[in-house]
Image (tube, grey):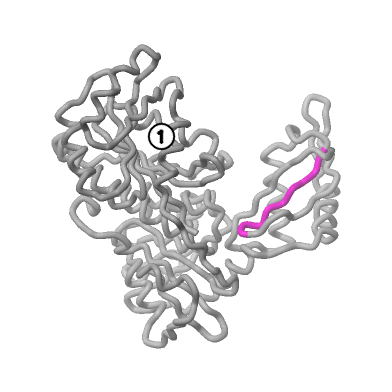
Amino acid sequence: MRKSVVAIVGKPNVGKSTIFNRLAGERISIVEDIPGVTRDRIYTGTEWLNTKFNVIDTGGIEIGDEPLLVQMRQQAEIAIDEADVIIFMVNGKEGITAADEEVSRMLFKSNKPVVLAVNKIDNPEMREKIYEYYSLGFGEPFPISGTHGLGLGDLLDEVIKHFPEREVEDIDEDIIRFSLIGRPNVGKSSLVNAILGEERVIVSDIAGTTRDAIDTPFKREDNEFIIIDTAGMRKRGKVYEKTEKYSVLRALRAIERSDVVLVVLDAESGIIEQDKKIAGYAHEAGKAVVVVVNKWDTVEKDDKTMAKFEEKVRGEFQFLDYAPIIFLSALTKKRTHTLLPRILEASENHSKRVQTNILNDVIMDSLALNPTPSIKGRKLKILYATQVAVKPPTFVVFVNEPELMHFSYKRFLENRLREAFGFEGTPIKIYARQRK
């Protein structure tokens, strides 16, 4: 079920990013400190009263050198297009400005629910100032303080009232959902067409797949798939083509609904920072990943070219060391036949369960091979382990003192599990817990 999206909109310096960071709080995914993971804080998940949703910080959307008013309009347009509910933020210390009125006119035309937040109301005496904001026409203004975290509970109570009712999809676990993510012009749409080809068999009776025009069900041999294509996912226009971060917003929607994510790279133009940002979201979401190097036909090759490019991908995407890499050309369809078997393998590994007794045999063998280290005279003792979840495979290791489980030893255990059980294409998570 897709999460609702909340966008924070307003003129510069009203405190949008401060509120965004407070809403994100501890809910931001915490990923091991591995080189190559690049996060973009424009979009994050959060939770209020057991309701999970995503938040967009439009203050993080920078659009070239356009005049301020044009930038504001473009940022608001992106938020309006993406959001289910909009938080319109104003500066309570300034009163209503012409820029506030400009943004309010845009929001009125959007027909989206708007909740008005008056920021920088840092003490009770200032609350009398909020009444003038009724004139903006969005109903009750909510006084908040980003600096001190005041009033956010009342604001969020109002926000979640406006979330649309979501139908729960009847998801068939046998159908593999995969998406293609990547920056513009890496060939995602061409690759979708190459995968579907002329042999596609549309599976028309799958519940929940006809609601969204970007979902394409098809069948190969005995396996059913759904492609979630991020290319052209929303309306196109100059603002989106010029805003790299918009491709991240589109990708995140698709990642959320996928079992397997194809990170599509352009062999011709090489790897850029945006590729790592987008791939980092798939990793943090715990999805199975296959790295696809497209346009391989455009590269001059010798017998070492592929190995060198693969080495470069491994160096830039160290956090995706579990992901297989496929070189192909969507244009010529060369090697595209190798893609679906890898997607199938990654999906199976993403859902793999390991029997507890076999798991603990591997853990005990690992301890014999590499005994746990001592830290300041205290030694980590691993008692037993169990798998607690799939998608991705998640393991809890019960120990005497969790703080003694160093990242490097956890990494060693992960490598041992991969050697024993495969898990190619999927991240795995290991948590240390104290046995009580």
Query: Closest to the observer: 332 or 89?
Result: 89
Tell me the quarter of the picture where residue 393 sits: bottom right
Q: Could you tell me which residue is drawn at 48 percent across and 62 percent down?
A: 167
Counting from the top left corner in percent of width and height, residue 19 is at: 40, 30
Horizontal side of residue 169 vs 348, given as left or right? left
Residue 332 is covered by the magenta coloring: no
For the question of whether residue 300 can be seen, the reply is no
Image quarter in which the C terminus is found: top right
The region drawn magenta spans 391-399
Counting from the top left corner in percent of width and height, residue 162 is at: 40, 46
Q: Is residue 207 above or below residue 97?
A: below
Counting from the top left corner in percent of width and height, residue 402 is at: 75, 36
Q: Is residue 32 above or below residue 98?
A: below
Q: Could you tell me which residue is drawn at 44 percent across and 46 percent down?
A: 54
Q: Secondary structure at mark 1?
A: helix
Q: Is residue 89 above or below residue 292?
A: above
What is the magenta segment's predominant secondary structure? strand
Horizontal side of residue 71 vs 272, given as left or right? left
Q: Determine which residue is flagged by label 1.
A: 20
Q: Given the image, on which type of amino acid does mark 1 rest? A: Phe
Residue 398 is covered by the magenta coloring: yes
Query: Closest to the observer: 233 or 189?
Result: 233
Q: Could you tell me which residue is drawn at 23 percent across and 19 percent down?
A: 94
How many residues crowd around disc 1 within 10 Å: few (fewer than 14), some, or many (20 or more)? many
Q: Could you tell me which residue is drawn at 23 percent across and 36 percent down?
A: 137
In the picture as drawn, the residue positioned furthest to the top comes out as 125
Tell me the quarter of the picture where residue 184 sits: bottom left
